[in-house]
Image: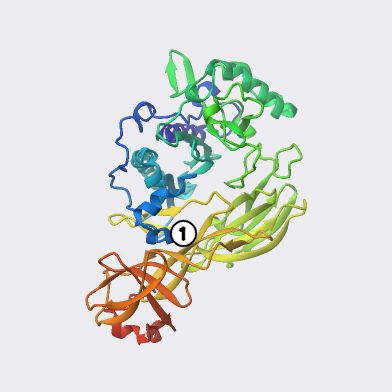
Amino acid sequence: MKKRLISAILTISMIAALTGCGGNTGAESIKSDGSQNEAVQEESGSDSDAGNTAESDLASEPEPATSESALTETEADEEPAGAPEIVLLKKHYYENSDDEEYKELFTGSFATPLLSEKSAKAYPELARSMEEDGKTELEYFESQVDEYLTQARTDYTENTEYFYGPYTINQQVTVKRLDDKVASFFFPVDAFMGGAHGIYGNGYTTYDTPTGKVLKLVNVVNSVNDLPGILKTELEKTYADSLDMFFDLEGSLANYVDGDSFSEGDNYYTGYTWAFTDEGIEFYFGPYELAAYAAGAQTVVLKYNEYADFIKPEYIPDSTADKKGRIIEDINMPGVDIDQDGNPDSLYVEYGTDANGDVSSADIVYNDQRLTVANEGDIPDLSEVKCYLVETADDRCYAYVVTSEYSDYIGIHVYDLNSGTLKKNGEKYLSRAIIGYDDDDYSLYREYAFYDPDKMYFAERFDIIASFSAIMSYHVGADGIPEPDSDVYEIGTVAGWEPITCIKDFDADFVNDDGTLTQGTVNTGETFELVRTDGKTWLDARISDGRIVRLSFNGGGMELTVNGINARELFKELMYAG
């Protein structure tokens, strides 16, 4: 499970801090480890009762305000389940010194996947397993944050002038394959605790979608014992021009096992890091595993069409001929062939610094081409720039460089990679699609995952009765720029410290299950849960008896009217965020 990778990274980063980058520090003793937790492997999803999702103290996710909310339970149950939909549980961490220097000591971020409300109903066992694993991972990650914070405080106090911070530890989520057979993830983790460089690697988990059980390699291939030889062959083909980087390929692979890493005498055995993709089973080998740190990570894919007799048929996709789109975060890893010329490509954001060492610019670099994304002053925090590779099902390829803007907006800068010449097609400014915050810990929240170019969720802010984030799905347009899928937004987070309440009876239209409208009266004291809007003329809200009322609006701010009446006359308070 991912927590073991974090622990290994902690060890490696401390060694790096002490030894610098002086060659091979001993592959057998400090290999990064993405193994699974024993209890999860054996128990997750196996004894749970169908139809019940896990109770946990994680951030509760409100019912998504989609058009499905107007369906009857019977109609909703008749819809095909399809591929699960992923949301992310996320949290950020930071601390500055408490002296006049206000030095940044530590930053961190955590993400783990969960199912959306709709998918949790379709796959209750998978939802249960992911909720339980998410809770465990968050608790373990926070224990690691405490260790990093303690070390950062100590090092800064003892050597303030030469403190090279901030110390960091981050866990992301990469969706590798997601369908009605498997839900497979990598968890990129990076960490820095001083020294010449940080360390990075991957955790992993693969679930059986119907049962929620965590899968081991023995469950999905016909012979785990054959893997070292198969992987040696594939690695030698993939890295034919740089075979001298490997320590001892045959000897290293002989020390891999299916499951948790462990020591036995002087020998250290490492669990394979692997995930299903739409093409096959991908195996990942992090820094220091097969080669020195400078060689980076290595990956190989055992393709379904080449290893059909080796991979168990129940886990091969129904159709491997139909290509699916994908979005890859943190693309600067070996083995990604963007232009399909048979060679790995390089795509990343490079930062420039000023005389004080502060970030002053951000460029996108594609192989030997470079374009400036932003300079100092263009955006609030240049260090928050992220790069994503976006590949569509019809073989179009773009880079999305995402910048953090003001008022929780992001800038999506779209770069065309299709002609071989890096060029900017344009940009779009939207908000992140946050679903809800935890009642007890506002830094803990749920957000739609960003992994499918045909269903990317973004949000816009509206001030209609209250300030709220309205979420819509987008797809990659003809020029690569995100385009909305419909003209109706689902309402996510809503500002305010108490329910929206009316103070006057008024006539309104009620939305029937079939979408037709029936006129009725909203009574004084009624409360409103905002559901959806077109952002232009109407807003749907659920009242206390479960019915949906459609509110027609015009104007905004203090001049907002609802159903022809000034909103200040209808509602207890207009709760707008600053």
Give the side of residue 235 with respect to residue 385, left or right: right
Give the residue displayed 31% in from the left and 81% down from the top.
507
Q: Image point 34% across, 40% down: which residue?
A: 128
Residue that appears at 62% across and 55% down: 400
Residue type, mark 1 in image: Ala
Label 1 belongs to which residue?
433
Residue toward you, 191 or 531:
531
Q: Nearer the viewer, residue 99 or 414?
A: 414
Q: Quadrant of residue 463?
A: bottom left
* Screen quadrant of the C terminus: bottom left
In the image, residue 113 lies at what x, y percent? 43, 44
Q: Locate residue 276: give its quadrant.
A: top right
Residue 107 visible within the image: no
Which SS class for mark 1? loop
Where 118 sits versus 424, above or below? Answer: above
Where in the figure is residue 334, as x and y percent of width and height?
65, 37
Q: Is residue 424 above or below residue 7?
A: below
Nearer to the camera, 514 or 491: 514
519 relative to 391, above or below:
below
- Residue 478 appears in view: yes
- List the single residue furthest toward the top: 265
